Amino acid sequence: MEQKLEKIKKEALESIHSAESLDSLEEIRVRVLGRKGELTGILRTLGELPAEQRNAVGKKSNEIKKVIEEALDAKISGLQQASFSGLATSEWIDVTLDPALSFREKKPGHLHPISRTQYEIEDILTSMGFQILDGPEAETEYYNFEALNIPKFHPARDMQDTFWTEDGNLLRTHTSAIQIRGMEKMTPPFRIMAPGRVFRYEATDASHEHTFYQVEGMMVDKDISVAHLIYVMEEVLSGVFKSKVKVRLRPGYFPFVEPGFELDFSCLICGGSGCRVCKQSGWIEFLGCGLVHPNVLRAGGIDPEKWSGFAFGMGLNRLIMMQAGINDIRHFMSGDIRFVQQF
Ligand code: PHE
């Protein structure tokens, strides 16, 4: 047993010494000290040893555990230190440099990926007769909720956690608010789209951000059906991805559409056969859409007996994350030039 312990110690210290990344140190920690680790295994079977051995082996195991833990900690801080000093050489800025001279060597700026994709979608939709509208980021409760068939105290208000202002207004939680503003301005038939920034009072993580971008679309005409919606969505996605994209609809609930759908598109990474990005399903969950609810048409001054329409609201961040393989939505708002430079 003693020999076995010595062997574990020797091997662990050797591999810690030659490890070159934090990931490989973590692997070593799991292999030796983890729940199913080599040393943990021995500590767990202590009870089965004869009493006279139990003390000695227990003591020795704990000593070794401590030595390995200390070696791991020391190596981790060593590697971190090295990567910080590495940053100092790779990321330094010469503040004494003449800006006129240094500018010449710099790459010219370019669009942020959000703007680039937004403009692409604007081009595709305007080519199909959609007009671009704008609306305020600070909205009234009426445009963001009430006119969209979400009355006060309706549980659907909780679907979108809201930043309220002190005077009872809010930061728009979706671009759907512009549907109402659009209907007030336009006389049917019409097609409108509205790109913009939206805000949710949410804890942030790799897939949630308090500020993100949507593009709203709405078409009002005689006898609009789900087929029109599917066609427009396939055109937009095929245009953005520059290859034929298929969509499918699943039932979804949004108070301002009836019927309402969640729209998925065929995964472009695996071509539909299943991969990590689409969680083996072949489909990517993409947006909410549906046929405009009669109450919403009425709120916009449009007679639902005469006119019908479809609407959709797509998230730009998600689309770009899928397209460019970005795994954390927070990069978009981080202001980190290294992120933007990759596009
Ligand atoms: N506004 C919805 C959201 O942000 C999306 C949506 C728009 C759904 C239009 C249906 C129709 O989640």
Image: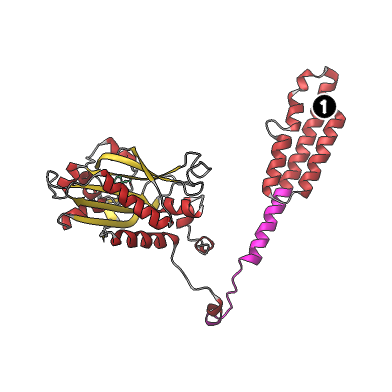
Residue type at mark 1 is: Val
- Residue drawn at 79 percent across, 27 percent down: 58
Is residue 99 one of those drawn in magenta?
A: yes
- Residue drawn at 39 percent across, 54 percent down: 238
Q: Could you tell whether 244 is left or right of 166 in the image? A: right
| Residue 172, x across and y down, in percent | 30, 51
Crowd around label 1: few <14 · some 14–19 · many ≥20 (10 Å): some
| Residue 115, x across and y down, in percent | 40, 62
Q: Is mark 1 within 8 Å of ligand 1?
A: no
Inspect this view and state whether residue 164 appears: no
Q: Nearer the viewer, residue 304 or 195?
A: 304
Instruction: State which quarter of the image contains the N terminus.
Output: top right
Is residue 107 one of those drawn in magenta?
A: no
Q: Main secondary structure of the magenta part?
A: helix
| Model colouring | secondary structure
Label 1 sits on a secondary structure element that is helix
Magenta-drawn segment:
75-101
| Residue 342, x across and y down, in percent | 53, 62
Residue closest to the far right: 3
Query: Could you say which quadrant of the image residue 111 lies in?
Result: bottom left
Query: Could you say which quadrant of the image residue 295 lies in?
Result: top left
Q: Which residue is mark 1?
A: 57
Query: Could you say which quadrant of the image residue 258 lies in?
Result: top left
The total number of labels drawn is: 1
- 111 relative to 254, above or below: below
- Residue drawn at 76 percent across, 19 percent down: 47
Inspect this view and state whether residue 325 appears: yes
| Residue 101, x across and y down, in percent | 55, 82
- Residue drawn at 59 percent across, 78 percent down: 96
Q: Nearer the viewer, residue 42 or 192?
A: 192
Q: Nearer the viewer, residue 232 or 318?
A: 232
